[in-house]
Amino acid sequence: MPVEPVIDLHTFHPRDVKSVICEYLFAAINAGYTEVRIIHGRGTGAQRAMVHAELKRHPSVVTFWDSPESHLGATVALIEINADLHSHEITKATR
């Protein structure tokens, strides 16, 4: 399945969001992306908090912020992936 620079979490069950984010970030790194958007929606802020918590824990995330514009009523979280870790992740995945 091809990896895009944007993932919309609306299509995933909330209980799966943590693992989806982690798997998506590693796939994005391996695809060569240095910046991705994670659409988590507006609502109560619970999903946004979950996304931010996972981004804080992920070893390849350098920084992230909420995008001031919205997409179909959804808030977009932007992250930058540490390009220096890109080759490390590919090497680790091929072992």
Image (tube, rainbow, N blue to C red):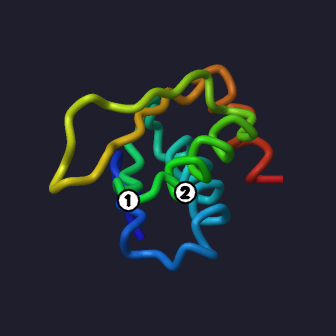
- As rendered, which of 6 and 52 lies closer to the eye? 52
Quadrant in which residue 78 is drawn: top left
Amino acid type for the residue under numbered disc 1: Gly
The residue furthest right is 95
Amino acid type for the residue under numbered disc 2: Ala
Quarter of the image containing the N terminus? bottom left
Residue at numbered disc 1: 43
- As rendered, which of 53 and 85 lies closer to the eye? 53
Residue at numbered disc 2: 46
Quadrant in which residue 77 is drawn: top left
Q: Residue 17: x and y, percent?
A: 58, 66
Q: Residue at x 27, y 52 (%)?
A: 74
The residue furthest left is 72
- Per the image, label 2 sits on a secondary structure element best described as helix
Q: Judge the density around disc 1: few (<14), some (14-19), many (≥20) Cα neighbours within 10 Å.
A: few
- As rendered, which of 83 and 59 lies closer to the eye? 59
**Horizontal arrangement in the rendering, residue 80 relative to residue 49 (left or right):** left
Quadrant in which residue 84 is drawn: top right
Please tell me whether residue 86 is drawn above or below residue 48 in the rendered image.
Answer: above
Q: CA distance from mark 1 to mark 2?
A: 8 Å
Q: Judge the density around disc 2: few (<14), some (14-19), many (≥20) Cα neighbours within 10 Å.
A: few
